[in-house]
Amino acid sequence: MAGNLYLHREAIAGLGPEAGAEIWAAEAVACASQWNVVKLSNTKPKKISFLTYEDFERPFPALLESITVNLESGTAFRRSYWTRTNPPVLHRKELLLPVDHPRLEEYSQLTQSLERIGLLKETSSIGTKLAWEQRLREAGVKIVGHAIEQLDEATSPPDVRIQRHLAAIRRDGLSSPVQALIRYGLIDEKTTVFDYGCGFGSDVEGLRTAGISAAGWDPYYAPDEPLESAHVVNLGFVLNVIESPAERQDVLRSAFALARRCLAIAVITSSRARTDCCQAYGDGHVTRLGTFQKFYRPAELKDFIEVTLGREAFPTGPGLFFVFSDPVAEQSYLLSRQTRRTSSRLSIAARRKEAREAAFEALRPVLESIASTAEDLGRWPVPSELPNEITDALEQAKTSAARAIHLAGSLSDPEILEQAAKQRQEDITVYLALNEFNRRKNYRDLPERLQRDIRAIFGSYAKAQTAARELLFSLADSSSLLKAAQKTSSDGLGHLDVDANYWVCTELIPRLPAELRCFAGCAEKYAGGLEEMQLVKMHLLSGKLTGFQYTDFDLSPLPRLEVRIKVDLRRQRISDFDHSDEDQRLLLKSRFMAPDQSDYERQKQFDAQAVDFGLSELGSRATGQEITTVAEAAGGFLKGWKWEQINDQTQQ
């Protein structure tokens, strides 16, 4: 296939001793023993892949693991599918077997039967487990052993008419995926945006009002609008209303083909699903309105996107992923997510030394701006990085940029610049560690600014990668994480409980030490959604992270828990929990906040009163009724943001 040769392990003997010896040598590099299929790639450098499928007794074995060996470098890359809900599956498996295999005829007959009823057409849309199962259901058949049987009428899909257009809703503001694109700087006044499946066009209208070039298309509400390429394409809440898995793949490919930089994909996740009033249909449900809804699990959606597009999908929120067609835009986005944001900028005046008498006084404002730029970068800028207003001022003063940068050195405090460089070094280390955790990027694919940062701060890309790997490997050391959490909590940022769990508001994560930021970043690689969570709990001893989403975190002293997501990094598992009907409240919220956050002082006073009424005995979470019961037993009741003492008049 495509110039590559696939063989079952039992068929290798037919290749001859030379090819067999090469395969067994590669196996030693891969340290693999359980594989049952080998792939010989016709590429340069030459590669051999060892594929572990389910037992060939199954009619369509699922892929469990692949290990690819680069014969020139002697390195191996392993990719696991064990925990994936939608792994690739193997069709026509008889083609991989030796011609004398005892069950070759049986397997071939199944393939021929499937070909006669047209189920092996459009192979691009049946390559994964869920898509193949959906194709069988749509055809009204099932596979028993290696034979085709008709489904009973009782198990056939319900006879309903899907009303896709009724799933469109009118919004007063921008949708969550468009807000996320703006938040991460992927949409600005210079960006063109195309909304694929725009519905009533609320996002298009809102972006145009803000002065952003936007257009949209919808098969029902805007069918005559042209399909246009744009810097950013939004595929918001479209895939989940399409009942055909094959059509979902076609729509995803079509939308991605229009994106010159980035495609945003948003769906409704299983944690937010309400299926009690729905009817099962295919791999989803039909609602009372007659619309179809496919409720995705995060890992399932990530697999679907990556298998369909062959690109990495970056989780950004619950049910929200970004996929990049431009590698430089991708790296800029990843770097922005790992850049530490401080609570407030130190004034330039406090970070400058007395200017040298030889400096040009007339140029002092310009030189101060250059010094400020250096402190932001963590290094001295190159002339091309200076803002236009500075270069214009230097041109008028007939001073070269290089000379001005040299003079600006007298206006910068070396200690402040060193501190900024250290912070920037941490930012880049976390960013590269998460790149290494996922898959390594070439130096030439990094943004120019980042390349300059690496040269100036690390000296070389190799040294930066070494620091990143050391940081990533340090996450396996619970004592290292615990030490970082102890220092951070003692400095008043977050809370370390007696069970070695570190709690902190999500918006404070960029202020954390590199170890804890990288730990949270690894969890987000699997689950996404931290941007929608207001609180995280890092289980430092067990390698887990739990995210908590509250309906009124910023407005209530006792926020109500809505959704909880637990990520097990060691076992690579994601669990969603819906608490919207339980009235669970967060107690002593100020422990997880920072003093400079909004309403911190008011929350701290509230929590002090709560402790006086004995509520700290309830732990971090309790129901509203439990809180009321304990408070009343202590003679108190809640009134807004204050605890009041029950007096005789109140009792009467």
Image: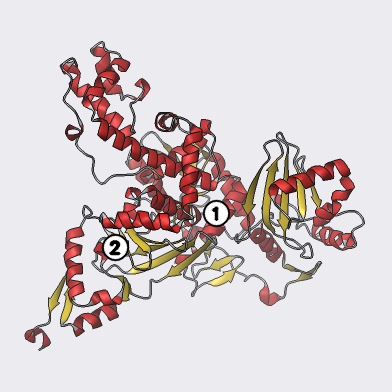
Mark 2 crowdedness (10 Å alpha carbons): few <14, some 14-19, many ≥20: some
What distance separates the C-alpha of mark 1 from that of mark 2? 28 Å
How is colour applied across the structure in the image? secondary structure
Q: Residue furthest top?
A: 398
Q: Is residue 173 above or below residue 627?
A: above
Label 2 sits on residue:
553
Q: Residue at x 56, y 63 (%)?
A: 162
Q: Residue at x 25, y 74 (%)?
A: 616
**How far from the left and from the top, in percent, is residue 544?**
46, 62
Label 1 sits on residue:
302
Q: Secondary structure at mark 2?
A: loop
Say whether residue 97 is left or right of residue 637: right
- In-front residue for pair 21/446: 21
N-terminal of the two: label 1 or label 2? 1
Asked whether residue 406 appears in the rendered view, the answer is yes
Q: Residue at x 82, y 44 (%)?
A: 21
Q: Is residue 249 above or below residue 225?
A: below
Q: Secondary structure at mark 1?
A: helix
Say whether residue 411 is left or right of residue 256: left
- In-front residue for pair 322/379: 379
Asked whether residue 330 appears in the rendered view, the answer is no
Mark 1 crowdedness (10 Å alpha carbons): few <14, some 14-19, many ≥20: many
**How far from the left and from the top, in percent, is residue 496?**
33, 62
Q: Residue furthest right?
A: 100
Query: Quarter holding the C terminus?
Result: bottom left
Query: Mark 1 is on which residue type?
Result: Lys
Dividing the picture into quadrants, the one containing residue 562 is bottom left
Say whether residue 46 is left or right of residue 102: left
**How far from the left and from the top, in percent, is residue 517?**
39, 50
